[in-house]
Amino acid sequence: MTGADAALAPWRERWRLEADGDAFVTPSSILQPVRRDDEPLFLKVATSHEERAGNTVLAWWSGRGAAGAIEHEGDAVLLERAGGLRDLAALARSGAAGDDAATRILCRTGLRLHTAGSGPRPEGLFSLRRWFRDLLDESHHPVGASALYADATTVAEDLLAHPAGDVVLHGDLHHGNVLDFGSRGWLAIDPKPLHGDPGFDVANILCNPDAAIALAPGRLERTVIVVSDETGMPVRRVLQWTFAWSALSAIWSEQDGTDASPAAGIAQRARALLTG
């Protein structure tokens, strides 16, 4: 038995689960496809505070707009498993019409999640100001691009000071986190434990599903209009959230030692549209 499998074994026993594939590890979780009474499910055990709090958000949504949490206790959650064949990233790569259709699905999923919860909000939510702290603190800005990040900081400060609302956010709404659940439709997985302005949830759509699409000529200009149409948010505000988020994402990429150029490229284009 591997270490990952051993970590999941008590939960399989507790919830009467049968393994339906190998256990695997991500930076924040241990997961395994399982079955109970022949129903396909996913067992997930959080290994970080952020992921644990995200599981609580998922359970709080109670299957409305997100994968249903069949069981939830401590670090562990037992989830519906997506069984549909459709894929939003593949749809986005099929051409402009498919890309726009994927964007609309993501926007509608986000809007549904923003009104999905009931009762007191889950504990452990981060504010957007905390989420943006590496952008708001100039000591974290990459060397050599001070003007871009200074401008993004100004935009972020204004957005955070004048929120359009305060909802429980998904926090990582993109093509890989909204899946086809067959008759249940498109549902979200893997939320971050965030609350704040609902406009934040659209920003990651503009940076995905990959750099080739996100940076394609005219894509940003076209997609902000689609997002605005779906959400009712002014185009300028969509661009502002995209600018702030992509700049923060580039900072995180720099910190992780990964390629920051795609996120920085989106930030530069968003800034050009805002100032043009």
Image (spheres, rainbow, N blue to C red):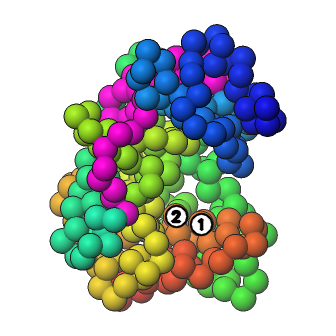
CA neighbours of label 1 inside 10 A, class few (<14), some (14 to 19), many (20+): many
Whether residue 54 is visible, yes or no, is: no
Residue located beneath label 1 in the image: 249
Tags 2 and 1 touching, CB below 8 Å: yes
- SS assignment at label 1: helix
Name the spot of residue 269 as percent of width and height, x first.
43, 83
Image height of 114 relative to 9, above or below: below
Q: Which residues are magenta?
A: 60-89
CA gap between label 2 and label 1 equals 6 Å
Left or right: where does residue 249 sit relative to residue 177?
Answer: right
Whether residue 5 is visible, yes or no, is: yes
The residue at the point 54 percent across, 32 percent down is: 20
Amino acid, disc 2: Trp
Residue located beneath label 2 in the image: 245
Amino acid, disc 1: Ser
Tell me how many marks there are: 2
